[in-house]
Image (cartoon, rainbow, N blue to C red):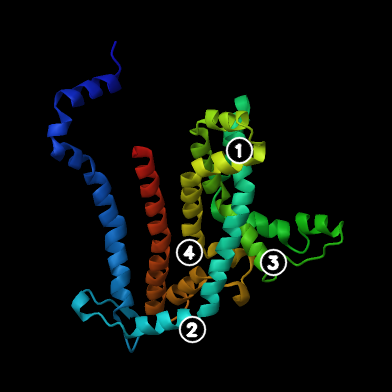
Amino acid sequence: MARPMDTLYRWLTQIKLNKSPRLWAGFAIPGTVWLIVLFAIPFYAVACVAFGTIDPVFRDAVPQWNPLSWNFVQAQQIFTSLATGPLQGVAIRTVVYVVCAMSLSFVIGFPIAYFLARHAGKRKILLLVLIIVPFWVNYLMRMLAWVNLLSVDGLFTRFMRIFGVNYNWLDGSPITVILGLVYGYIPFLILPLYATLERLDWRLVDAARDLGANSRQAFRLVTLPMSKAGLVAAGILIALPMFGDYYTNDLLSRSPSTEMIGNQIDFFLNASSQPQNGALLVLALSLFLLLFMSFYLRSTRQQTRQVTR
């Protein structure tokens, strides 16, 4: 008895897909509608608020839906503030925190992904399940668990006192914020890295060892270059949400000395009478993150060209 997928494949083959470009375009309709409704229209609304006006009485944002009437004066002030003004420190702090969190995530996550792909054997499924299990718990609840562990009377704080470390982890500590970012997003790094490493041709590593390379040389000259695409994809996958994160900072610090761009956006949109500034920061952050996406697309395009050659 033929399987449904085999029947579908034969049907698609019989209708000569190569001569039916409209059929292929039809498969993109649901995704296109999804992007328009849930991304393009909301993003345009944010731009209309950013380049709109403020009601002089109620101090509410008045969106300007006509792009020809947009006002860019406030945008110039915000971008200047990010470059050389009061928001410069917040912008630099955000980049530093994300870079440190990404670096620590790679140090922790790459060996785990490598072990799962190379040496886990029959325990692979069990270990993958253990990595995915935290996703079953709400992110907010997981951060609250960190608050209990790192409080003055928390289990982790009392444990560290045994070794003479008496540190207030929740008193506006940058280390706590960075560790919280690592804990919250490291599974998003491990899983794509594992998927990349599992597809590698390990015979090339064995060939390098046969040709005289030691384990470190084989790893540096063979494994790392072959996993470059996965490293870039995993880094971008965690960097994008880290730059906009504000829950982690609010729960683990609540200090102006550790505020990130996401905290400023949340403040302007929800706790102040300047929603226009919040919308402008959203656009500025989106433009900055576009650089990461451009780098990722460029690297994947170069790798595709090398493979096709």
Look at label 4 and name its amino acid: Gly
Tag 3 or tag 4, which sits nearer the N-term? Answer: 3
Position of residue 56 measured from the top left corner of the image (x, y, whole percent): 33, 89
Q: Quadrant of residue 221?
A: top right
Tag 1 or tag 2, which sits nearer the N-term? Answer: 2
Does residue 141 show up?
no
What residue does disc 1 label?
218
Tag 2 or tag 4, which sits nearer the N-term? Answer: 2
Q: Nearer the viewer, mark 4 or mark 3?
A: 4
Q: CA distance from mark 2 to mark 1?
A: 46 Å
**244 horizontally vs 60: left or right:** right
Tag 4 or tag 1, which sits nearer the N-term? Answer: 1
What residue does disc 2 label?
84
**Nearer to the camera, 37 or 239:** 239
**Nearer to the camera, 92 or 66:** 92
**Nearer to the camera, 69 or 220:** 220
Q: CA distance from mark 1 to mark 4?
A: 37 Å
